[in-house]
Amino acid sequence: MSEVQRKKYSEQEKSKIFDQEFMPNIDSMYNFAYRLTFDEDDAKDLVQDTYLKAFRFINSFEQGTNAKAWLFRILKNSFINDYRKKSKQPAKIDYQEVETYYNSDDVDYTSTTDLRVDAVKDMLGDEISNALNSLAVDFRTVIILCDLEGFTYEEMAKILDIPIGTVRSRLHRARNLLKDKLRSYASTMGYGNDEEEGS
Amino acid sequence: MDDNSTPSGDRKLSCSDVSKCFQLLESILDGENLPNSKEMLNEKLAKCEPCFKHFHLEQAIRDVLKTKCTKQAVPSELEASIREIIQDRK
Ligand SMILES: [Zn+2]
């Protein structure tokens, strides 16, 4: 942090914020961490790190603002800065790379999928989770933030430090990739044969 | 929402501006509050088959993600160990 932190909260206030605004998010935080790392111990470390940082920098948290978004941003940054460096998991695509790969916010909306709504509705939880987990981390992240955690585009832009237009286009691409995965599951389940509709 | 999922003969089969329409539909599904979004949505769904299909598929995908993704239980000792470290550092 560049600025010297003002001492704005008393010890009592700090504990209160920590207990009432930070801790209730531990479930979401842990699941986010797990979906980033796919490892229980790494997820625990990441969440623990995040809470320790949150407490250390609690004076830069504005009461009345969205604590969950604030915590998610710290977690995401910890993941990029600390965890990914020591990760044994080969980084598939990195945040920077994605941005240069697709340096435009223009998205092709014309590509259509023949995925059927009832095929999607019949998917098992494991299939949905596997499809999500198979996406590169940047695409996975926007879907987690938007669909699983319910953040708005504006909150996502702050968490990820990217413009809203990029949030929107990245989400669109992420969902298209997800649809491709789901379609391949659907075809193994016998959906999507063009003949014999509904037989 | 009513399940009027039978394709209606009144809908046109090609969309006049897919990019704009789909972006709008996706923003609405993502809970972005746009002016007149309700009216625009109803209009698209009533009059445009590609929009109708896209909306329902996108909606189904969001639904299964929200309801079916497997969740991990937070390890029971995690919260206590965080509090302990903070306590020690005070
Ligand atoms: Zn349309």
Image: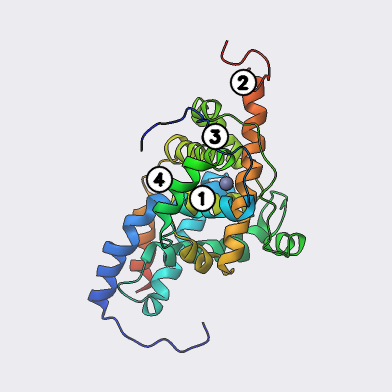
Label 4 element class: loop
Quarter residue A86 falls in: bottom right
The yes-or-no answer for disc 1 within 8 Å of ligand 1 is no
Q: Name the residue under label 4.
A: B74
Mark 4 beta carbon near ligand 1 (under 8 Å)? no
Closest to the camera, between mark 4 and mark 1, is 1
Q: What residue type is labelled 2?
A: Tyr
Of residue B47 and residue A104, the one placed in the foreground of this image is B47
Amino acid type shown at disc 4: Val
SS type, badge 2: loop
User: Do dots 3 and 4 share one subunit?
Assistant: no
Q: What residue type is labelled 3?
A: Ile
Q: How far apart are marks 4 and 1 (CA)?
A: 35 Å
Q: Name the residue under label 1.
A: B25
Name the residue located 26 percent from the left edge and 63 percent from the top edge.
Answer: A20
Q: Can residue B34 be seen in this view?
A: yes
Alpha-carbon span between mark 3 and mark 2: 16 Å
Identify whether A116 is placed above or below A173: above
Tags 1 and 2 touching, CB below 8 Å: no
Q: Do the residues labelled 3 and 4 touch (CB within 8 Å)?
A: no
- Expressed as whole percent of the image width and height from the top left, the position of residue A45 reads 50, 55
Q: Where does label 3 land, which residue?
A: A128
Q: Which callout, 1 or 2, points to the residue nearer the camera?
A: 1
3D distance between C-alphas at marks 1 and 3: 22 Å
| Mark 3 chain | A
Separation of residues labelled 3 and 4 (CA atoms): 21 Å
Task: Say which residue label 2 marks.
Answer: A191
Q: Which of marks 3 and 2 is nearer the N terminus?
A: 3
Instruction: Pinpoint residue A156: horizontal percent, then vertical percent.
Output: 50, 62
